[in-house]
Amino acid sequence: MGEIELPVQIGPCVFQITFQVMDILPAYSCLLGRPWIHSAGVVPSTLHQKLKYIMGDKLIIVSGEEDLLVSGPSSTRYIEAAEEALETAFQ
């Protein structure tokens, strides 16, 4: 369908990554196997679901997402919060 270039923060660094827009349900990560990995000197491990690269004098290790199971007892109370309290950053 097309391409779009977006800034993506991976660990502490921001990379410009070209994404291909497709009308499908991909069964793989669109970030792996892409030219940005080679240009940034990143070493990907699909087995361990991690990326490793060196930025300056530091080794950066980025772990893949893990499936989370969130549950609570049925007697858990619902607490209403202000909209600005719901803002959070995930990595």
Image: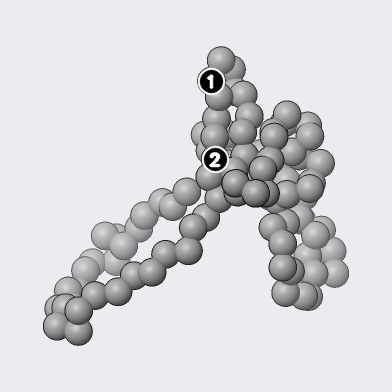
Looking at this view, name the residue that lies furthest to the front: 47
Where residue 48 sits in the image (x, y, percent)?
Answer: 60, 46
Where residue 20 sits: x, y (%)? 80, 60
Asked which secondary structure carries label 1, the reply is strand
| Position above or below: 13 against 32 | above
Q: Position of residue 5 (x, y in %)?
A: 74, 50
In the rendered image, the quadrant that contains the N terminus is: bottom right
Badges 2 and 1: C-beta atoms under 8 Å apart?
no
Which residue in the protein does label 2 denote? Answer: 62
Amino acid type of the residue that numbered disc 1 sits on in the rendered structure: Lys
Above or below: residue 34 compared with residue 57: below
Tell me how far mark 2 sits from mark 1, CA to CA.
Answer: 13 Å
What amino acid type should be assigned to the residue bearing mark 2? Val
**Circle 1 sits on which residue?**
58
Residue at coordinates 20% horizontally, 84% vertically from top-left?
A: 74
Count residues near mark 2 (Cα–Cα under 10 Å), then give few for <14, some for 14-19, many for 20+: some
> In terms of image quadrants, where is residue 43?
top right
Q: Report which quarter residue 76 is drawn in.
A: bottom left
The furthest residue to the right: 1
**Residue at left offset 72%, top offset 56%:** 30
Asked if residue 25 shows in the view, the reply is yes
